[in-house]
Amino acid sequence: MTTGLIVLIIVAAVLVVALLGWLMTRRRRSAVLQQRFGSEYEHRLEEHGDRRAVEAELRDASKRRRSLDVRPLSGPARDRYSDQWRAVQSRFVDQPDQAVSEADLLVAAVMEARGYPVEDFDDQIDMVAVDHPDVAENYRAAHAIHNRNAQRMASTDDLRQALIHYRSLFEELLADTSAPKPSTSSH
């Protein structure tokens, strides 16, 4: 074997090893994101169809979330919001459309009190997805029904479902007393 051929084989072997290492790292990052975001990862993948774009979006959301000062609610604040939620639920029987609108506002108020952004729904859903990925789809569905309700296009059963969805996020937001910082890497 000539020296040139040996060098070529070594360079090719190094490139193959580097490529395999890169692929394994990428797969590991994908697996971490899939595990961390669960059904939210799948939802976004189904919606966008581009795994790399979805993963970049989720890493970006995690990075933005780390920059927020999300804090737990005080005991009195939790009690006050719980009382408000019970009032919203009790109004549903006679005024379901109003109850859903109030639920949307109450969830936003709790999010704001905790330190989440509330000006833009896309930001809200991203931050919910980072901290509470299991209920992000519920929040998205509830908000969509709320928007249909504003156009008088939601049935009473839709409104009932929206209230159930809002409740799942509301309970998560109230129960979360630790305000953990997400650990998803932004590599």
Image: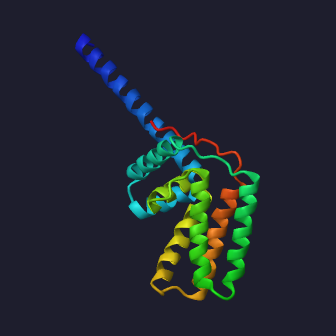
Q: Residue at x 72, y 80 (%)?
A: 90
Q: Residue at x 52, y 71 (%)?
A: 143
* Residue nearer the viewer, 25 or 114: 114
Q: Residue at x 52, y 45 (%)?
A: 65
11 with respect to 38 (left or right): left
Q: Position of residue 29 (x, y in %)?
A: 50, 41
| Quadrant occupied by the C terminus | top left
Q: Residue at x 48, y 87 (%)?
A: 152
| Quadrant occupied by the N terminus | top left
Q: Position of residue 135 (x, y in %)?
A: 61, 62
62 with respect to 11 (left or right): right
Badge count: 0
* Residue nearer the viewer, 86 or 175: 86
* Residue nearer the viewer, 166 or 115: 115
What color scheme is it? rainbow
Quadrant housing residue 6? top left
Q: Position of residue 8 (x, y in %)?
A: 27, 20
**Residue 95 visible here:** yes
Residue 119, placed above or below residue 36:
below
Quadrant housing residue 87? bottom right
Q: Residue furthest top?
A: 3
